[in-house]
Amino acid sequence: MSELLAIGVSHKTAPVEIRERLALSDARVKEFIRDLHGVAEIHEAVVLSTCNRTELYLVVGDPLEAETAVLGMLARQAAIGATELAGAIYAMRNCDAARHLYRVSAGLESMVVGEAEIQGQVKRAYEAALERETTGPLTNHLFKAALATGKRVRTETAIGERQLSLASVGVSLVRSELGDLASRRVLIVGSGEMGELVARSLADSGCSLTFVSSRKQSRAAALAERFGGGRIMIDELPEAMVTADVVVAATASPHVLIEARALEQIVAERSGGRLLLLDLAVPRDIDSACRAIDGVTLFDVDDLQAVIAGNRRVRQSEADKAVGIVEEEIQSFATWLGSLEVLPTVAALRQHAEAIAAGVVSENSGRWESASEADLERVEALARAIVTRLLHTPTLKMKELVDDRVHARMALVRELFGLESSDERALGDAVADAGDLAEIRRLPEPS
């Protein structure tokens, strides 16, 4: 019987240097899947590659042979030795592999727990495999169920609703303080990664963005062009603050850029209206004494970290709920997976027993010289009857199995009786009988 195998690396097991080497572009995914199909033991394949993970979901004949072959392929992709890569690789089979994909789709395995982008990435990976016709009965059911689980988690929990990054929490505080940001003037001091993240969060709010730079003027100009904002030099900052609503400071300066005494003079020149200061720098860009100035509200990194800590506690609580949903759904998958093996295993067991009975009758046929044709038919019927009665109760018990241990139990039966691997056609027939193939392309949209 074929088995489900998940093999890959993620931010939990590999540094960014290795993940970068294993990341697959759309074009490379197409080539990689073609190479996977060249491995005799691999029957179905879906490749998921993001900045934080590269994972292969495979249906294989011999898991050990397939895993060895795939490890070699990944090592060649990363241009490192297979032994070196092995420490970063994880491999899971059957329900463990399915549970991992469910958790990935639900955002439980993300670097930022609950992030929404992964749902769409899983969906696109599956659709790409569908287009290349590398899926099959097992991966079709797996990905459809995983996407449905991810959608259920986001519908029934608030796992993705609380922000966990400094930039996103800072912008949320700005919105909570000022409400609608349309027509508000925002100064972003600093053109590094943090400044860019803030600008990206504010870009669609309708506010007026101005980037303030002391150096790296080309970087500030590029951000201004990308987000439709203006650009000024650092020495123009005091004048610009007279009419600004928000100042976001996120530089790498070792010194304070906005001092309390200077800010008092700026506030005196303003025509009214509150000035909101958001200091995302460490060390701080804005003098903490600015908090005491009337008409000024200051949030610094410590304020934001307190909000993030609270949000993280809420997310963790919601993540616990999400884990419960995943476990509920994986029980259904486990039952489905096991049910696919029951009928083929029952058929193989009966065929095996009947072959043994027929062999024994044949081996002893020469000992019944006086037996008539009717007698021989009675002996053969008796042998078949013994097989039927002997297997009757085990057959009923196997067909009644509906829990998550069906797969393991069927594997044990096949091992005990030395049964041959079931025909792949039996797997497809079982899925078709369940009415699943008609639903395969009706994918749930990511929330």
Image (cartoon, grey):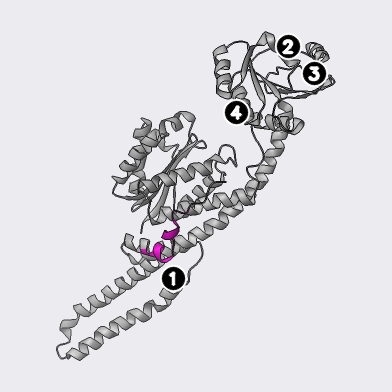
Badge 1 is on which residue?
A: 398
Magenta stretch holds residue 266: no
The local crowd at label 4, few if under 14, some if 14 to 19, many if 20 or more residues have their Cα within 10 Å, is some
**Front residue (pair 413, 180):** 180
Looking at the rendered image, the disc whose residue lies closer to the viewer, 2 or 1, is 2
Q: Is mark 2 on a helix, strand or loop?
A: helix
Q: Position of residue 21 (x, y in %)?
A: 41, 30
Tag on residue 290? Answer: 3
Q: Where is residue 163 in the image (x, y as percent from the top left)?
A: 66, 36
Q: What element carries label 1?
A: helix
Kind of residue indicated by mark 2: Glu
Extent of the magenta region: 429-442
Badge 4 is on which residue?
A: 200
Image quarter where the N terminus lies is bottom left
Alpha carbon distance from label 2 to label 3: 17 Å
First of labels 3, 4 by sequence position: 4
